[in-house]
Image: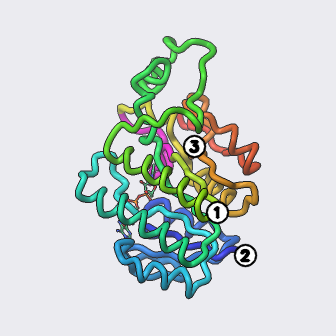
């Protein structure tokens, strides 16, 4: 069993992991309380506490979710939580010999592709304007953040590259699409979720596969269900992790 620390344990995805990741010893930290069995209130601004939690629990894998998760987040909050906080987490990992980091990046690190055809038509639900054949957005595409939040996620991915190459910490970046509290992509006045939805089952499955896989080096995966109208290429998850999502938003249309 892996000793896995989840930062941001009290949030939406942290809660899903507590429920679904039953094959690992889970530890959680957050600034808000939650019902993880092993949990400490902690702010990722506190480097010493991060190191203590990781070393005393012999953490081998960190799933880093903590941060401001809003695409409209302001610089002050991003600077503390997503930039400095993420550096603190990765430094603590290096100092306590954590072997693998799974980083919650975001589709917003490459969100400006949604201004281009045919992605903008797909997102708008104008499927009759979409050519029969088109290329999906790949994990190694240009980084095109659509917001300061997207920039903070691109930064986390690059910081991870530095920790991978310099300290040999295996690193998986998950460019997560849309994980929704009620797990239903049918949202009034929005077609976008039919493309970007990632079910609770699939985000947990992807993270579980990243934890278990011996093949992760430095890799970027899109966290999205197998939606008919997805715009991101998920084929590398099957090749590297032997993971394939099982949900498809069309079943809710
Ligand atoms: N939900 C999605 O669809 C989605 C999509 C793309 C990326 N992500 C990323 O995944 C991660 C988790 O997303 P979520 O939807 O569960 O978000 P969330 O807001 O529900 O959870 C984030 C958690 O982080 C905690 N947190 C914030 N700042 C902290 C700090 N300084 N120290 C300790 N804890 C702190 C919050 O208290 C919260 O519980 C985030 O990094 C988010 O950017 C989520």
- Sequence-wise, the earlier of marks 2 and 1 is 2
Q: What residue is pinned by disc 1? A: 168
Q: What residue is pinned by disc 3? A: 222
> Residue placed at 39% from the left, 38% from the top?
145
Dot 3 lies on which element?
strand
> Residue placed at 35% from the left, 63% from the top?
84
Magenta: predominant secondary structure element?
Answer: loop
How far from the left and from the top, in percent, is residue 198? 54, 45
Report if residue 186 lies within the magenta region: yes
Res. 61 image quadrant: bottom right
Q: Which residues are magenta?
A: 176-188
Q: Is residue 219 left or right of residue 73?
A: right
Dot 2 lies on which element?
loop
Looking at this view, is 28 or 202 the one in front? Answer: 28
Res. 216 image quadrant: bottom right
Looking at this view, is 229 or 30 the one in front? Answer: 30
How far from the left and from the top, in percent, is residue 118? 49, 18
> Residue placed at 61% from the left, 38% from the top?
248
- Sequence-wise, the earlier of marks 3 and 2 is 2
How far from the left and from the top, in percent, is residue 78? 30, 56
Q: Nearer the viewer, mark 2 or mark 1?
A: 1
Question: Is there CB contact under 8 Å for labels 2 and 1?
Answer: no
Ligand 1 closer than 8 Å to the CB at disc 3? no
Whether residue 101 is visible to the viewer of this picture, yes or no, is: yes
Check residue 185 in the rendering and tell me which mark sits there, or answer none: none
Q: Quadrant of the N terminus?
A: bottom right
Where is 225 relative to 127, above or below?
below
Q: What residue is pinned by disc 2? A: 1
Q: How many residues crowd mark 3 within 10 Å: few (<14), some (14–19), many (20+)?
A: many
């Amino acid at each position: 069993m892996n000793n896995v620390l989840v930062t941001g344990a009290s949030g939406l995805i942290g809660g899903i992991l507590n429920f679904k990741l039953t094959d690992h010893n889970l530890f959680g930290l957050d600034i808000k309380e939650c019902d993880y069995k092993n949990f400490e209130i902690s702010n990722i601004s506190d480097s010493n506490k991060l190191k203590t939690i990781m070393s005393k629990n012999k953490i081998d894998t960190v799933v880093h979710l903590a941060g401001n998760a809003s695409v409209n987040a302001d610089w002050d909050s991003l600077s503390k939580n997503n930039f400095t906080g993420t550096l603190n987490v990765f430094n603590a990992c290096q100092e306590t010999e954590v072997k693998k980091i799974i980083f919650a990046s975001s589709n917003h690190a490459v969100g400006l592709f949604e201004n281009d055809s045919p992605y903008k038509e797909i997102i708008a639900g104008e499927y009759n304007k979409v050519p029969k054949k088109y290329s999906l957005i790949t994990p190694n595409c240009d980084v095109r953040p659509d917001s300061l939040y997207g920039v903070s996620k691109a930064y986390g991915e690059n910081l991870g590259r530095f920790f991978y190459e310099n300290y040999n910490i295996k690193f998986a970046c998950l460019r997560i699409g849309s994980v929704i509290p009620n797990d239903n992509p049918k949202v009034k006045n929005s077609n976008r979720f039919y493309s970007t939805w990632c079910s609770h089952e699939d985000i947990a499955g992807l993270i579980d596969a990243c934890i278990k896989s011996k093949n992760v080096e430095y890799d970027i995966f899109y966290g999205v269900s197998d939606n008919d109208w997805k715009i991101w290429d998920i084929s590398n998850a099957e090749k590297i992790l032997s993971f394939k999502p099982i949900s498809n938003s069309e079943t809710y249309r």
